[in-house]
Image (cartoon, rainbow, N blue to C red):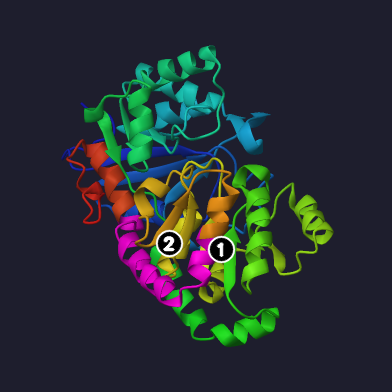
Amino acid sequence: MIFGMNSTGTRKSVAILTEIISPYRIPVFNELSDDPRIDLKVLFFSQTERRRSWRIPWEKIRFTYRVLQGVLVSQRYQGGPIFLNPTIVYDIWRGKYHSIICFGYHHPTIWLALIAGKIFRTRVLLWSESTSMDHRSTNRIVEYIKRYLVGKFDGFVASGRSQVDYLKSLGAKDDYIWVAPDSVDSDYFVQQSKLYRDRKAEIKRELGVGGPIILYVGRMLDDKGIPELIEAFQKVVVEHDATMLLVGDGPDIDRYREICSRKSITSVRFEGFCSQEMMPKYYAIADFLVFPTRSDPWGLVLNEAMCAGLPVICSRAAGASAELVYQDRNGLLHQPENVDEIYSHMLTLLRDEKMRKNMGLESQQIIASFHPKKMAKGFAEAVFELPNDAYKVKHAK
């Protein structure tokens, strides 16, 4: 008998192992839970972690979940947590899962899950967002360990093409890789942004801003490209009127405020943390989004901004850039840390309202294929080892 299947062989028990309860993942897990072929349980290593200020929308959760007992054993790049949850072995034995989908491979909890999977004959898949552009250690021992771990998984779920390429560079076989196109709550951002856009002038008055609005959304730290964004904007405002809204919090925000104050850049506004529920307000009043990251596995703010019909200026270091941003069609791409390119792209969009409008419409068409239903379908195809139809999108480059 195959573990996780009922007597009719039609329903499979699946566990997803992931770090914390993220509002961005709830729609996808709900969609996967709604699949009548799958009995889903999501096992979280912790309810939250210190970098996250968001409110967990418990009322939206429809899937079965449990927060495991465990400890924070260390931190990694950008302060990311590393969890150890020893009870995962018991959970896998008790759950008798057909498949376990593990987000990442850097947690000791995942290593225990791999061992338990071999013992209990459970198929273990790696869900990966990593790309070759991520900032990471070049230590040969670390790279060997990554390759060793990748070789122990039975299959892989990638967010997009860049993630597939990186997995293959670590030894994953193409026939064992499925793509689940990374997504946000698309319907919510489309609908709410439209509602707020009808009140655009009113909201701008409430915020005390006027003229064109350049938007950045994300954590406030150097690896997100904030220093070069501020430097580029300083050059922009010499030639064109604009306000730049920086939405988010992080360890370097006070230093950025001091830089703007020292350089007398008065048209930069630090809005601080904003809940997911209120983000459509900012997308609705913005003219375009800038995402200048130096290293980012994906960049879900790109999904959100495109749902809201915005053109995007994006670093090629963002994992999503290969999937979502088409040069001169819905956005403009630049090399990481290239101030001159960021400056030039911002001026180009500020000076051409028609281009911004056309690019915004293209963004909405492109992002329609990156919906929670599509992402859930990609996971299901990996579980059932079916052809990867979820990734056969019309806009594929």
Instruction: Report the front residue among 94 and 107.
Output: 107
What kind of element bears circle 1?
helix
Q: Is residue 77 visible?
A: yes
User: In the picture shown, does residue 126 fall above or below 205?
Assistant: above
User: In the picture shown, does residue 267 fall above or below 39?
Assistant: below
Disc 1 marks which residue? 276
Q: Main secondary structure of the magenta part?
A: helix
Q: Amino acid at mark 1?
A: Gln
For label 1, the crowd category at 10 Å Cα-Cα, with few meaning under 14, some 14 to 19 and many 20 or more, is some
Q: For this view, does 294 lie left or right of residue 221?
A: left
User: In the picture shown, does residue 197 fall above or below 23?
Assistant: below
Q: Is residue 148 magenta?
A: no
Q: Which residue is located at x 60 percent, y 54 percent?
A: 218
Residue 325 location, x and y as percent? 39, 54
Q: For this view, does 13 lie left or right of residue 139?
A: left
Measure the alpha-carbon separation of dots 1 and 2.
10 Å
Instruction: Report the front residue among 3 and 19.
Output: 19
For label 2, the crowd category at 10 Å Cα-Cα, with few meaning under 14, some 14 to 19 and many 20 or more, is many
